[in-house]
Amino acid sequence: MPVDHKVSSLLPFLSSPKLLPDESEADFQSGLKSLLSELDNPSPLAVALISQLNESLWWIKRHTVDKELLLHEAMARLLSKAGSYSETYDNRKVSEALERYLDGSADKDEAEWIDEILAESKLTLSDLRVRAFKDAAKHIKMVDDLIHRQHQTMRHLQRSIDSIDYKSRLIKRMDLELAALESKQSVKGALTLDAKPS
Amino acid sequence: MPNHHRNLTNRCNSLKSTGPRSASGKRASSQNSRKHGLNSAPDFESSLEYQALVDLIAEEGFPAFACADIAAGLLNYRRVMDAYYDTYTSPEPVNEFRRDMNVKASNPIFSELLSPSRSEPQDVREMATFFADMQRQERRKGGPVSRRSADTHKLIRYQRNGIARLSRAVRQG
């Protein structure tokens, strides 16, 4: 059975990958295909485990992005509280402006505005980042735990795949040995049959 | 109040309770505190997927008991990961008004609101403190990313148990 068929036959049991709206399904599938290509004719169970492995990799990517987002969130929060701006602050507005400022896509007014808030709070951009990291440390640690968990999950899955692969190779080897024995036996039998008339 | 008096009072008060009365109401309200459902014992054996999965694994030469274990382990792991995804995508929403409200700036508004009843400034201070506490609580939870990280972090142990069960079933099979 081709690998694609195995994947599609397993989908009803494994629930199709749920992606976030901004994620590309093509990327997800190409990752899965590249993992599957590393095994020679994988069994349905191996395919199932590899698809779980691919999902774990995907989660690691998501959580890595989350770490950056957490830092950004904390930076925006610090800025929104900074200086005299605290009288009329709006967290989302600062967050969006800061995002564009860091990308380098902020217009002149926005850039000046962020510079002004930074000056009022007597912070440089790197100071802000350091303080934000300190503030978000608790949540960043949580995300690190989540990433670590995915690594552990992948280790478990790899061990399981190895054991299936080893088992199938063992069965194949035993089949070959059996076939060799049988052929030897049949040759012997033929020889004894040949020997009898003489 | 002595213990038996308190018990009697509690029983009398419980009779006034307006909880659900119909069977469907009781069933619905029994799920009120359900968060992800991972603590309930799953019943995979009666599902159609389970049998089909067992058959599929049996074709690979695993013994019958191992097939059952692997299929249950796989479905259980999927159940955990589906709950993980649901928790990740639906964190507790941020109450932006509560988070961003300016308590200091609103003090005069409180005073104005309370003045017809000739309230003391103490009331205004208490109200401002109350709102400041609410705001602090809201901010402590962080933004949407912090919330979803904290929520998914609670599911780590289910994930650990789920994958360990699956891996053990496959390796022992």
Image: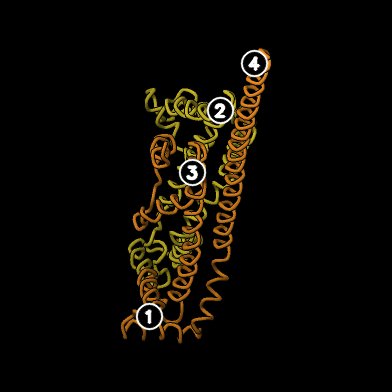
| Disc 4/disc 1 C-alpha distance (Å) | 89 Å
The reply to the same-chain question for discs 3 and 4 is: no
Write down the quadrant of residue B121 in the picture: bottom left
Q: Mark number for residue A193?
A: 4
Q: Secondary structure at mark 1?
A: loop
Identity of the amino acid at label 1? Answer: Gly
Write down the quadrant of residue A15 in the picture: top left
Would you name the residue on which mark 1 appears?
A104
Spot the residue most to the top.
A197
The image position of residue A124, as x and y in percent, is: 50, 84
Figure chain in yellow: B
Check the picture and name the quadrant holding the N terminus of chain A. Answer: top left
Residue B126 seen in the figure: no
- The vertical placement of B88 against B73, above or below, is below
| Mark 2 or mark 3, whichever is nearer to me | 2
The image position of residue A10, as x and y in percent, is: 42, 36
| Mark 2 or mark 1, whichever is nearer to me | 2
Identity of the amino acid at label 4? Answer: Leu
Q: Mark number for residue B81?
A: 3
| Mark 3 or mark 4, whichever is nearer to me | 4
Figure chain in orange: A
Of all chains, the one bearing label 1 is A
The image position of residue B146, as x and y in percent, is: 49, 59
